[in-house]
Image (cartoon, rainbow, N blue to C red):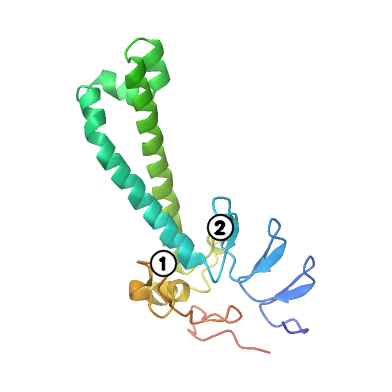
Amino acid sequence: MLPAVLKPGWRFCYVCESNNPPRSHHCGTCNICVLRRDHHCVFTGNCIGLNNQRHFITLSMYLFLGALYCNYLNSEMVYDLLSGFTWKSALTMIIPWMAWMMGLAEGYTFMVAIMSSTCILGMVFLAALMGYHIKNLKSGQVTYESTHKVKDFDCGWKSNVQQVFGERWHYSWMCSLIKSPLPTDGLDYPMRRSHEPIKSM
Protein backbone atom coordinates (compact mmCIF):
# COMPACT_ATOMS: atom_id res chain seq x y z
CA MET A 1 0.00 0.00 0.00
CA LEU A 2 1.36 3.40 -0.99
CA PRO A 3 1.02 6.25 1.53
CA ALA A 4 -2.16 8.32 1.54
CA VAL A 5 -0.20 11.54 2.12
CA LEU A 6 1.66 12.94 -0.90
CA LYS A 7 5.37 12.88 -0.04
CA PRO A 8 7.89 15.40 -1.45
CA GLY A 9 8.76 14.44 -5.03
CA TRP A 10 5.73 12.16 -5.37
CA ARG A 11 2.81 12.76 -7.77
CA PHE A 12 -0.84 11.78 -7.75
CA CYS A 13 -2.07 9.64 -10.64
CA TYR A 14 -5.68 10.52 -11.42
CA VAL A 15 -6.20 7.38 -13.51
CA CYS A 16 -4.97 4.87 -10.88
CA GLU A 17 -6.10 7.18 -8.05
CA SER A 18 -2.91 6.59 -6.09
CA ASN A 19 0.30 8.40 -5.20
CA ASN A 20 3.28 7.71 -7.45
CA PRO A 21 6.86 7.62 -6.19
CA PRO A 22 9.55 9.56 -8.09
CA ARG A 23 10.43 8.27 -11.58
CA SER A 24 7.19 6.31 -11.93
CA HIS A 25 4.70 7.16 -14.66
CA HIS A 26 1.34 5.94 -15.86
CA CYS A 27 1.28 3.88 -19.06
CA GLY A 28 -1.82 4.43 -21.16
CA THR A 29 -1.33 1.15 -23.03
CA CYS A 30 -0.85 -1.06 -19.94
CA ASN A 31 -3.29 1.15 -17.95
CA ILE A 32 -1.10 0.97 -14.84
CA CYS A 33 1.57 3.02 -13.10
CA VAL A 34 5.05 1.53 -13.58
CA LEU A 35 7.94 2.01 -11.14
CA ARG A 36 10.91 3.73 -12.79
CA ARG A 37 9.09 3.61 -16.13
CA ASP A 38 11.43 3.94 -19.10
CA HIS A 39 9.03 3.40 -22.02
CA HIS A 40 6.40 1.07 -23.43
CA CYS A 41 8.15 -1.34 -25.78
CA VAL A 42 6.14 -2.25 -28.88
CA PHE A 43 8.46 -5.18 -29.64
CA THR A 44 7.93 -6.97 -26.33
CA GLY A 45 4.40 -5.61 -25.72
CA ASN A 46 5.43 -4.55 -22.21
CA CYS A 47 6.39 -1.53 -20.22
CA ILE A 48 10.11 -1.31 -19.52
CA GLY A 49 10.59 -0.31 -15.91
CA LEU A 50 12.31 -1.11 -12.63
CA ASN A 51 12.25 -4.90 -12.78
CA ASN A 52 12.85 -5.54 -16.48
CA GLN A 53 15.01 -2.69 -17.81
CA ARG A 54 18.08 -4.90 -17.38
CA HIS A 55 16.48 -7.58 -19.56
CA PHE A 56 15.52 -5.05 -22.24
CA ILE A 57 19.06 -3.63 -22.49
CA THR A 58 20.48 -7.17 -22.64
CA LEU A 59 17.94 -8.04 -25.36
CA SER A 60 18.84 -5.00 -27.48
CA MET A 61 22.56 -5.72 -27.06
CA TYR A 62 22.26 -9.35 -28.17
CA LEU A 63 19.93 -8.44 -31.05
CA PHE A 64 22.54 -5.98 -32.31
CA LEU A 65 25.35 -8.54 -31.99
CA GLY A 66 23.20 -11.10 -33.85
CA ALA A 67 22.49 -8.61 -36.65
CA LEU A 68 26.18 -7.71 -36.85
CA TYR A 69 27.13 -11.39 -37.13
CA CYS A 70 24.42 -11.94 -39.76
CA ASN A 71 25.78 -9.10 -41.89
CA TYR A 72 29.32 -10.39 -41.48
CA LEU A 73 28.31 -13.86 -42.73
CA ASN A 74 26.34 -12.30 -45.58
CA SER A 75 29.04 -9.84 -46.72
CA GLU A 76 31.29 -12.27 -48.61
CA MET A 77 28.44 -13.71 -50.69
CA VAL A 78 27.09 -10.23 -51.52
CA TYR A 79 30.56 -8.96 -52.41
CA ASP A 80 31.11 -11.87 -54.82
CA LEU A 81 27.62 -11.56 -56.33
CA LEU A 82 28.00 -7.83 -56.98
CA SER A 83 31.51 -8.34 -58.46
CA GLY A 84 33.32 -6.19 -55.92
CA PHE A 85 32.73 -2.59 -54.92
CA THR A 86 31.80 -0.43 -57.95
CA TRP A 87 29.32 2.38 -58.59
CA LYS A 88 26.95 -0.22 -60.04
CA SER A 89 27.12 -2.43 -56.92
CA ALA A 90 26.76 0.61 -54.64
CA LEU A 91 23.61 1.71 -56.50
CA THR A 92 22.25 -1.84 -56.35
CA MET A 93 22.76 -1.97 -52.58
CA ILE A 94 21.47 1.54 -51.83
CA ILE A 95 18.55 1.69 -54.28
CA PRO A 96 17.86 -1.88 -55.44
CA TRP A 97 14.53 -1.01 -57.08
CA MET A 98 16.11 1.61 -59.31
CA ALA A 99 19.04 -0.67 -60.22
CA TRP A 100 16.58 -3.42 -61.15
CA MET A 101 14.38 -1.08 -63.25
CA MET A 102 17.45 0.33 -65.07
CA GLY A 103 18.64 -3.19 -65.88
CA LEU A 104 21.79 -2.93 -63.74
CA ALA A 105 20.72 -5.88 -61.55
CA GLU A 106 19.11 -9.18 -62.48
CA GLY A 107 16.24 -10.71 -60.51
CA TYR A 108 18.43 -12.81 -58.19
CA THR A 109 20.87 -9.94 -57.58
CA PHE A 110 17.92 -7.64 -56.87
CA MET A 111 16.48 -10.04 -54.27
CA VAL A 112 19.86 -10.46 -52.56
CA ALA A 113 20.31 -6.67 -52.51
CA ILE A 114 16.84 -6.22 -50.95
CA MET A 115 17.60 -8.81 -48.24
CA SER A 116 21.06 -7.40 -47.55
CA SER A 117 19.80 -3.82 -47.37
CA THR A 118 17.10 -4.93 -44.92
CA CYS A 119 19.73 -6.67 -42.76
CA ILE A 120 21.98 -3.60 -42.79
CA LEU A 121 19.11 -1.24 -41.95
CA GLY A 122 18.01 -3.56 -39.14
CA MET A 123 21.54 -3.59 -37.74
CA VAL A 124 21.78 0.22 -37.90
CA PHE A 125 18.39 0.55 -36.16
CA LEU A 126 19.42 -1.90 -33.42
CA ALA A 127 22.76 -0.08 -32.97
CA ALA A 128 20.91 3.22 -32.50
CA LEU A 129 18.42 1.64 -30.07
CA MET A 130 21.18 -0.01 -28.03
CA GLY A 131 23.36 3.13 -28.08
CA TYR A 132 20.51 5.36 -26.88
CA HIS A 133 19.62 3.11 -23.95
CA ILE A 134 23.24 2.54 -22.95
CA LYS A 135 23.75 6.33 -22.96
CA ASN A 136 20.72 6.67 -20.66
CA LEU A 137 22.03 3.83 -18.49
CA LYS A 138 25.41 5.53 -18.06
CA SER A 139 23.82 8.87 -17.18
CA GLY A 140 21.25 7.34 -14.77
CA GLN A 141 18.23 8.45 -16.78
CA VAL A 142 15.05 6.90 -18.09
CA THR A 143 13.59 8.04 -21.42
CA TYR A 144 11.38 10.73 -19.82
CA GLU A 145 14.32 12.17 -17.88
CA SER A 146 16.55 12.10 -20.96
CA THR A 147 13.92 13.95 -23.02
CA HIS A 148 13.30 16.55 -20.29
CA LYS A 149 17.02 16.93 -19.35
CA VAL A 150 16.52 15.69 -15.78
CA LYS A 151 19.86 14.66 -14.24
CA ASP A 152 18.90 14.46 -10.58
CA PHE A 153 19.58 10.73 -10.31
CA ASP A 154 23.00 10.60 -11.99
CA CYS A 155 25.32 9.21 -9.29
CA GLY A 156 28.21 8.18 -11.54
CA TRP A 157 28.24 5.46 -14.18
CA LYS A 158 29.03 2.61 -11.77
CA SER A 159 26.16 3.40 -9.42
CA ASN A 160 23.84 4.03 -12.37
CA VAL A 161 24.63 0.64 -13.91
CA GLN A 162 24.11 -1.02 -10.52
CA GLN A 163 20.67 0.62 -10.23
CA VAL A 164 19.59 -1.27 -13.38
CA PHE A 165 21.68 -4.47 -13.38
CA GLY A 166 21.68 -5.05 -9.63
CA GLU A 167 24.33 -6.05 -7.12
CA ARG A 168 25.99 -8.53 -9.49
CA TRP A 169 26.18 -6.01 -12.33
CA HIS A 170 29.71 -7.16 -13.28
CA TYR A 171 28.37 -10.27 -14.98
CA SER A 172 24.54 -10.07 -14.84
CA TRP A 173 24.55 -8.38 -18.26
CA MET A 174 25.78 -11.63 -19.83
CA CYS A 175 22.61 -13.59 -19.15
CA SER A 176 19.18 -12.56 -17.90
CA LEU A 177 18.90 -15.82 -15.90
CA ILE A 178 21.63 -14.69 -13.46
CA LYS A 179 19.94 -13.43 -10.29
CA SER A 180 21.05 -9.94 -9.32
CA PRO A 181 18.96 -8.16 -6.65
CA LEU A 182 18.34 -4.46 -7.26
CA PRO A 183 19.58 -1.97 -4.63
CA THR A 184 16.20 -0.18 -4.56
CA ASP A 185 12.58 -1.09 -3.96
CA GLY A 186 11.38 1.45 -6.55
CA LEU A 187 10.23 4.00 -3.98
CA ASP A 188 13.55 5.62 -3.01
CA TYR A 189 16.48 6.43 -5.29
CA PRO A 190 19.89 7.94 -4.57
CA MET A 191 20.11 11.57 -5.65
CA ARG A 192 22.91 13.18 -7.65
CA ARG A 193 24.35 15.45 -4.94
CA SER A 194 23.65 13.57 -1.73
CA HIS A 195 23.98 9.97 -3.01
CA GLU A 196 21.38 9.14 -0.37
CA PRO A 197 17.80 7.94 -0.85
CA ILE A 198 15.07 10.56 -1.03
CA LYS A 199 14.00 11.33 2.53
CA SER A 200 10.59 10.05 3.49
CA MET A 201 8.08 12.39 5.07
How many neighbours does mark 2 have within 10 angstroms: few (below 14), some (14-19), or many (20 or more)?
few
N-terminal label among 1 and 2: 1
Visible in this render: residue 85?
no
Q: Quadrant of residue 177?
A: bottom left
- Tell me where residue 157 appears, x and y as whole percent: 39, 72
Q: Are the residues at dot 1 and dot 2 in contact (C-beta closer than 8 Å)?
A: no
Q: Residue furthest top?
A: 103
Visible in this render: residue 162?
yes
Report whether 173 appears left or right of 183.
left
Going 41% across and 34% down the picture, which residue do you hit?
A: 118
Report whether 37 appears left or right of 130.
right
| Rendered position, 36 above or below 47 | below
Q: Which type of secondary structure does the marked residue at label 1 adopt? A: helix
- Tell me where residue 174 appears, x and y as whole percent: 35, 66
Report whether 133 appears left or right of 30.
left
Disc number for residue 62: none
Going 54% across and 85% down the picture, which residue do you hit?
A: 197
Quarter of the picture holding the C terminus: bottom right
- Tell me where residue 20 appears, x and y as whole percent: 69, 74
**Mark 1 residue type:** Lys
Q: Which type of secondary structure does the marked residue at label 2 adopt? A: helix
Q: Which sits in the foreground, 178 or 134?
A: 178
How many neighbours does mark 1 have within 10 angstroms: few (below 14), some (14-19), or many (20 or more)?
some
Mark 1–mark 2 Cα distance, whole angstroms, equals 15 Å
| Rendered position, 119 above or below 17 | above
**Mark 2 residue type:** Thr
Disc number for residue 147: 2
| Rendered position, 126 above or below 33 | above
Q: Quadrant of residue 188?
A: bottom right
Label 1, on which residue?
Answer: 138
Going 44% across and 61% down the picture, which residue do you hit?
A: 57
